[in-house]
Protein backbone atom coordinates (compact mmCIF):
# COMPACT_ATOMS: atom_id res chain seq x y z
CA UNK A 1 0.00 0.00 0.00
CA UNK A 2 1.30 3.45 -0.91
CA UNK A 3 1.20 6.55 1.27
CA UNK A 4 -0.30 6.67 4.72
CA UNK A 5 -1.84 3.47 5.98
CA UNK A 6 -5.62 3.43 5.99
CA UNK A 7 -7.28 2.82 9.34
CA UNK A 8 -9.71 -0.10 9.51
CA UNK A 9 -12.11 -0.58 12.43
CA UNK A 10 -12.94 -4.21 13.27
CA UNK A 11 -16.22 -4.61 15.14
CA UNK A 12 -16.76 -8.12 16.45
CA UNK A 13 -16.40 -10.33 19.48
CA UNK A 14 -15.21 -13.65 18.00
CA UNK A 15 -11.54 -13.97 18.95
CA UNK A 16 -10.44 -16.32 16.17
CA UNK A 17 -12.06 -14.19 13.50
CA UNK A 18 -10.56 -11.00 14.93
CA UNK A 19 -7.12 -12.61 15.05
CA UNK A 20 -7.38 -13.71 11.40
CA UNK A 21 -8.65 -10.28 10.30
CA UNK A 22 -5.99 -8.45 12.30
CA UNK A 23 -3.26 -10.61 10.78
CA UNK A 24 -4.53 -10.20 7.22
CA UNK A 25 -4.94 -6.45 7.57
CA UNK A 26 -1.56 -6.08 9.26
CA UNK A 27 0.11 -7.94 6.40
CA UNK A 28 -1.74 -5.63 4.03
CA UNK A 29 -0.23 -2.59 5.75
CA UNK A 30 -3.39 -1.28 7.40
CA UNK A 31 -3.72 0.28 10.85
CA UNK A 32 -6.29 -1.68 12.84
CA UNK A 33 -8.69 -0.53 15.56
CA UNK A 34 -10.88 -3.05 17.40
CA UNK A 35 -14.20 -2.94 19.18
CA UNK A 36 -15.73 -5.97 20.90
CA UNK A 37 -19.32 -4.71 20.88
CA UNK A 38 -21.66 -2.70 18.71
CA UNK A 39 -21.81 0.24 21.09
CA UNK A 40 -18.02 0.36 21.44
CA UNK A 41 -17.74 0.15 17.66
CA UNK A 42 -20.10 3.09 17.19
CA UNK A 43 -18.12 5.18 19.68
CA UNK A 44 -14.83 4.35 17.96
CA UNK A 45 -16.27 4.93 14.50
CA UNK A 46 -17.49 8.43 15.34
CA UNK A 47 -14.45 9.37 17.47
CA UNK A 48 -11.64 7.89 15.37
CA UNK A 49 -13.06 8.23 11.82
CA UNK A 50 -11.64 5.06 10.24
CA UNK A 51 -11.49 4.80 6.45
CA UNK A 52 -13.24 1.39 6.56
CA UNK A 53 -15.34 -0.69 8.95
CA UNK A 54 -15.30 -4.50 8.99
CA UNK A 55 -18.38 -5.59 10.91
CA UNK A 56 -19.64 -8.90 12.28
CA UNK A 57 -23.43 -9.09 12.52
CA UNK A 58 -23.50 -11.24 15.68
CA UNK A 59 -22.53 -8.80 18.41
CA UNK A 60 -23.17 -9.21 22.15
CA UNK A 61 -25.14 -5.99 22.65
CA UNK A 62 -26.53 -4.58 19.39
CA UNK A 63 -27.22 -6.46 16.17
CA UNK A 64 -24.75 -5.59 13.43
CA UNK A 65 -27.59 -4.48 11.16
CA UNK A 66 -28.51 -1.79 13.67
CA UNK A 67 -24.85 -0.74 13.91
CA UNK A 68 -24.81 -0.39 10.11
CA UNK A 69 -27.97 1.74 10.17
CA UNK A 70 -26.60 4.01 12.89
CA UNK A 71 -23.30 4.53 11.07
CA UNK A 72 -25.19 5.34 7.87
CA UNK A 73 -27.22 8.05 9.62
CA UNK A 74 -24.16 10.30 9.67
CA UNK A 75 -21.27 8.67 7.77
CA UNK A 76 -20.50 7.24 4.36
CA UNK A 77 -17.51 5.22 5.59
CA UNK A 78 -17.39 1.96 3.63
CA UNK A 79 -18.70 -1.02 5.61
CA UNK A 80 -17.87 -4.63 4.81
CA UNK A 81 -19.88 -7.20 6.75
CA UNK A 82 -17.84 -10.30 7.63
CA UNK A 83 -20.30 -12.86 8.97
CA UNK A 84 -21.01 -16.53 9.43
CA UNK A 85 -24.59 -15.85 8.34
CA UNK A 86 -24.82 -17.39 4.88
CA UNK A 87 -28.54 -16.98 4.25
CA UNK A 88 -29.33 -14.80 1.25
CA UNK A 89 -31.95 -12.88 3.26
CA UNK A 90 -29.30 -11.86 5.83
CA UNK A 91 -26.96 -10.72 3.07
CA UNK A 92 -29.67 -8.71 1.32
CA UNK A 93 -30.79 -7.11 4.58
CA UNK A 94 -27.21 -6.12 5.44
CA UNK A 95 -26.70 -4.55 2.01
CA UNK A 96 -30.08 -2.81 2.17
CA UNK A 97 -29.18 -1.49 5.64
CA UNK A 98 -26.14 0.30 4.22
CA UNK A 99 -23.29 -2.20 4.01
CA UNK A 100 -21.16 -1.87 0.90
CA UNK A 101 -20.13 -5.53 0.74
CA UNK A 102 -20.72 -8.86 2.45
CA UNK A 103 -18.15 -11.62 3.00
CA UNK A 104 -19.04 -14.97 4.54
CA UNK A 105 -16.72 -16.86 6.87
CA UNK A 106 -14.50 -18.62 6.49
CA UNK A 107 -13.07 -16.01 4.16
CA UNK A 108 -10.16 -16.21 1.77
CA UNK A 109 -7.50 -13.72 2.85
CA UNK A 110 -6.52 -12.48 -0.62
CA UNK A 111 -10.13 -12.00 -1.64
CA UNK A 112 -10.89 -10.11 1.56
CA UNK A 113 -7.89 -7.82 1.05
CA UNK A 114 -9.01 -7.17 -2.54
CA UNK A 115 -12.48 -6.23 -1.27
CA UNK A 116 -10.86 -3.93 1.32
CA UNK A 117 -8.90 -2.19 -1.44
CA UNK A 118 -12.06 -1.77 -3.53
CA UNK A 119 -13.98 -0.35 -0.56
CA UNK A 120 -11.17 2.07 0.26
CA UNK A 121 -11.04 3.26 -3.36
CA UNK A 122 -14.79 3.76 -3.29
CA UNK A 123 -14.55 5.58 0.05
CA UNK A 124 -11.86 7.90 -1.27
CA UNK A 125 -14.18 9.00 -4.08
CA UNK A 126 -16.86 9.90 -1.53
CA UNK A 127 -14.67 12.41 0.33
CA UNK A 128 -15.45 15.91 -0.82
CA UNK A 129 -12.88 18.67 -0.29
CA UNK A 130 -13.99 21.44 2.03
CA UNK A 131 -15.19 24.54 0.25
CA UNK A 132 -13.08 27.64 0.85
Image (cartoon, rainbow, N blue to C red):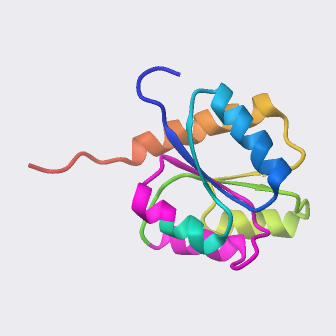
Q: Residue at x 19, y 50 (%)?
A: 130
Look at 79% across and 32% down and name the residue there.
109
* Residue 104 position within the rendered picture, expressed as x and y whole percent measured from the top left: 85, 51
Residue furthest out toward the top: 2
Residue 104 in view, yes or no: no
User: Position of 118 compared to 55: left or right?
Assistant: left
Residue 6, percent from left and from top: 49, 37
Residue 42 image position (x, y, % from top left): 53, 69
Q: Quadrant of residue 24?
A: top right
Is residue 24 visible in the rendered image? The answer is: yes
4 and 84: which is toward the camera: 4
Image x and y of residue 52, in percent = 54, 48
Q: Is residue 72 above or below residue 34?
A: below
* Residue sitting at x 63%, y 38%: 116
Q: Is residue 57 magenta?
A: yes
Q: Going 74% across and 42% down the picture, which residue do you hit?
A: 21
Does the magenta segment cover residue 8?
no
Q: Which span of residues is magenta-colored?
A: 44-73
Residue furthest to the left in view is 132
- Left or right position of 36 against 71: right
Amino acid sequence: MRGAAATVLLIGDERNTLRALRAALGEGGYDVLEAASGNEGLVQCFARHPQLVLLDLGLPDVDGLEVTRQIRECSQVPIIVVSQRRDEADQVEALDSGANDYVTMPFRENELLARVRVALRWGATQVKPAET
